[in-house]
Amino acid sequence: MRFGGHESRAQILGEPRDTWDDVDSDLVWGEPGSYTWFAGCTEIPRSAVGERIAMRVEAQFGYVMGRSDPQCLVRVNGQIAQGVDGNHREVLLTERAVAGEHFDILIEAGTIEDRRQLGFAVSLHIHDTQTEKVYYDLRVPVDVARLLPEDDARRHLILTHVNAALAEIDFRPGDPGRYRASLNRAERIAAQIYDAADFEKKPTIIATGHTHIDVAWLWRLRETRQKMARSMATALKLMEEYPDYRFMYNQGVLLDWLNEDYPELFARIKDRKTEGRFEIEGALWLEPDANITSGESFVRHILHGVHYHEETFGVRPRIVWLPDTFGYTAALPQLMALAGLDVFVTHKLSWNDTNRMPYETFFWQGIDGTRVPAYFLTTQPYTSTSIGTTYNPDLKPTHVMGTWKRYGQQALNDELFLVYGHGDGGGGPTREMLENVRRMERGIPGCPKVKHEPMRPFFDRLLKKMHADPASFPTWVGELYLEFHRGTLTSVAKNKRNNRLAENALREIEALAVLAMTARDHPYPAERLHKLWRIALLNQFHDILPGSSIGGVYEDSDRDYAAFFTEADTLLAELAGTLAPEGEYVLFNVLPRRRNGLVTFPGADPQTIVDGGTSIPTQTIHRPDGTVEQAAPLVDVPATGIRNVSVKPSGQRATSTSTEFSISKRHIENAILAVALDEGGRIASVHDKRNGRDLILPGQPANRLQAFRDMPVAYDAWEIDPDFEDQSWEIDDLASAQVVETGPHRAAVRLEWRYERSRIVQIVALEAGSARLDFDTWIDWHEEHTLLKTAFPLNIKADRATAEIQFGHVERPTYRNTSWDRARFECAMHRWVDLSEPDFGAALLNDCKYGYDARDTTLRLTILRAPTDPWPEADRDQHRFRYGLFVHHGTFAAEGVPAEAEAFNLPLRLLPGAVGGARATAELLSLSGHGVTVESIKRAEDGDGIVLRIWETRGYHTETGFDLPPEFDTAQEVDLLEREPRPLPVAGQRVTLGLAPFQIRTIRLGRS
């Protein structure tokens, strides 16, 4: 025996074992997150010649939520044999034993849980295949019979034959021939069960082996790599024993890691794939969160997933396989259709805590009107009384019978699908499951017919049926909201912020890289961007980004993001350095419209920005963490473009010559808004001078910080329970208030509150000429089981709130008429949520928050949580974020809420030039009209031309146009995979596009 860390694997595999410790039954081992190696040799005795010999691992296996502890990887004679866990304890050594044959055994045992193991052993066994066969021939029908009614004739047929077969078996020792003869008789009687005709038409259940592996959750990424190796080794070993075994796997990232860590296993997978026994499906790079992940990130999950499977396996996946994600954006159907993905599969909506989804086979219609087929897995035990289903059963007749019983559209469709196998380190399917499948394939009266097949042929048949008769299948319109796990929109806030910042950084780097490529012929950093995207995509996994993992996962995530932002800053600096000489700066606007705005940069000393012939003095602005920056307004900055400016020291601080601002501890006013604060630092009123209206309900303060008891009954990091409002506390203990900025560019008040063990600091600011009140926030949070929200009761007549999602927005009621309404007490948003009358309203903008609620006319932004499980220290940290209250005269007016939120998240950038850079002014892309934006500008994946992703933001039919950059003269529309080009007309250099509501159009620009 040898103890070692994760990093010592290679050394241990090659070292001599003469110094290893002996193992006995009193050995205590298995630290949490540790590895122990056990080694030994065995020799086949003469008494076992010709027998089938297996070894059995003896350990104190524990079971936690479908996985086991320990989990082992077994090598026999230096070769990986299979994984071993609590569900897979036997390893076949030889089909036909030879006397004196030696086997060298090396077992790597990983332990995760905070429990200890006592003892470890391996025993040898003769595997009697005939006895096993008769056992399953009888036991599987018995499992069916137990579930049939007492008066069902099929139950009595099965039990009569089972009893007759058992009566034939002679268990007396001493005469092997007599025992074999009795088994033969029992086997013939058992066969009569499978030969019996059923009394009714049977549905068909297609079964495919699978193992769901969370990329991270209650273990770290490094352990997932080992889980993947063990699980795949076990699947491959079972394929050797069961030629009829069919297995599917979907996550490219884990297959890629397997290739890096265990190329011998990966090569065997490719061989089995070629044989048609190991199925590669699932179009996404991994199984991401589908509420928080941005639209462009979803596109990249598809790009990376499809390209990887095509390049590595020659497979074109077309299924969106997301069985375990916590709700599904209504933008997904359009993304699927634009990428040629043809069916969406999950089961997670069966976890709803309030309402049962009415369909399992249906068309799903997204916000743009696109419809795609959707399929919900219906597997559950036959005796279940809940609506909950599973995608990792330990396949028995009860699951096959339960799959049909749970299906609510039996009159419409009589062929269903299930996957089976233990997940998350449970090793996938077992020999028992495969033996069960074989019996059910033969046919058992009272049990649906089973076919052991790959997944894709089932969906090919289903899609053909749905498209041939679409009117017979129902349609679900809008988001697939999971009435469960609502806290995942907020838990572990630092990861939500890092995710938003990373997505924004990638958008900026790609656009700036195209500018540098076209303006200065600078090489496009494709490989470096590819690596940055892989970091961002990895950390969008559905237990990392939602905040539902252990602390070690977030140590890894922190490390990943630190590397990401270091490289992102380096790349931005390199690219900007080509576009301005040393001593000058690049003023960069990533948005596809010319814009004015404040640009900020670090420093306490006042500066002057020289922009053309204009000198603009900076103002010192304050941040809530105590730092200061310099800020100055720039105007008419090129769309998706740059120009050079210089920054010089200023002899004096900027002073206001305008009477626009009026500022005190209780009042902030510019030319558009007059804001009053109460004695607790909350917003008492917001008066819009443009139309004379007051935004806030009289007598009800806004920016009202509220703490709620947050102790879910279960799933702490995942849940916000509906009774969270039963206990709440106002945070109005204002420790200090001071005026910190008086203009000329911004006026601001610094407010500090104390709450229990925590501090909350805000800089509440108004920019000159702005209709947006900003709340720049720093929180030192040390609470437990506390939910923090900020409330804005609005003096607006509206019964629906509008919230941004990926590539669009959705409306949700603010009333609670039905159970469906009441269940939506916490919802997802991206950069904004809005409550409006047709010509007046307000939106809450944010730079990294994703949860909100809207009730009556009060909008509340969910700021922080403080769960203790599975990470006891979650969110106990310092937090930085911004939100803003934008007062408007129409959500989708010319420069309405979507444009304001985009600018709020992507401010103007000031980047230094470098030696070798040259002065440049460039406008890469300027879109005409309103309500259209560009989500990404990048070089094409194949290196030929550049790709623009344009989408309509307001839900209107509209038209836009743009001029081709001088280097390009052709335009083609392509799909999300940048294929299937369709030429677009170019008039001179002008391209004109029509867009339907929320339509996404991907355009490739090239050279003829």
Image (cartoon, helix red, strand yellow):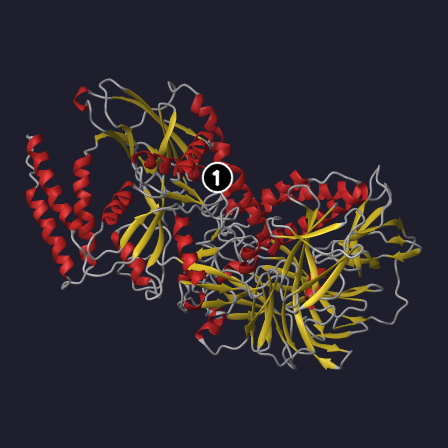
Q: Secondary structure at mark 1?
A: helix
Q: Provide residue 642's location: percent of width, then percent of height.
A: 81, 51
Residue 491 visible at all? yes
Q: Is residue 498 above or below residue 942?
A: below
Q: Is residue 231 left or right of residue 854?
A: left
Q: Is residue 143 left or right of residue 272?
A: left
Residue 900 visible at all? no
**Quadrant of res 73:** top left
**Circle 1 crowding by C-alpha within 10 Å: few under 14, some 14–19, many from 20:** many
Residue closer to the observer: 232 or 564: 232
Q: Residue at x 20, y 54 (%)?
A: 144
Q: How many marks?
A: 1
Q: Residue at x 81, y 41 (%)?
A: 520
Q: Callout 1, which amino acid?
A: Leu
Residue found farthest to the right: 613
Q: Provide residue 726's location: percent of width, then percent of height.
A: 47, 72
Q: Quadrant of the C terminus?
A: top right
Q: Is residue 295 above or below residue 816?
A: above
**Quadrant of res 859:** bottom right
Q: Provide residue 32's location: percent of width, then percent of height.
A: 42, 40
Residue closer to the observer: 698 or 73: 73
Pointer 1 residue: 255
Q: Provide residue 271's location: percent of width, then percent of height.
A: 42, 33
Residue closer to the observer: 219 or 239: 239
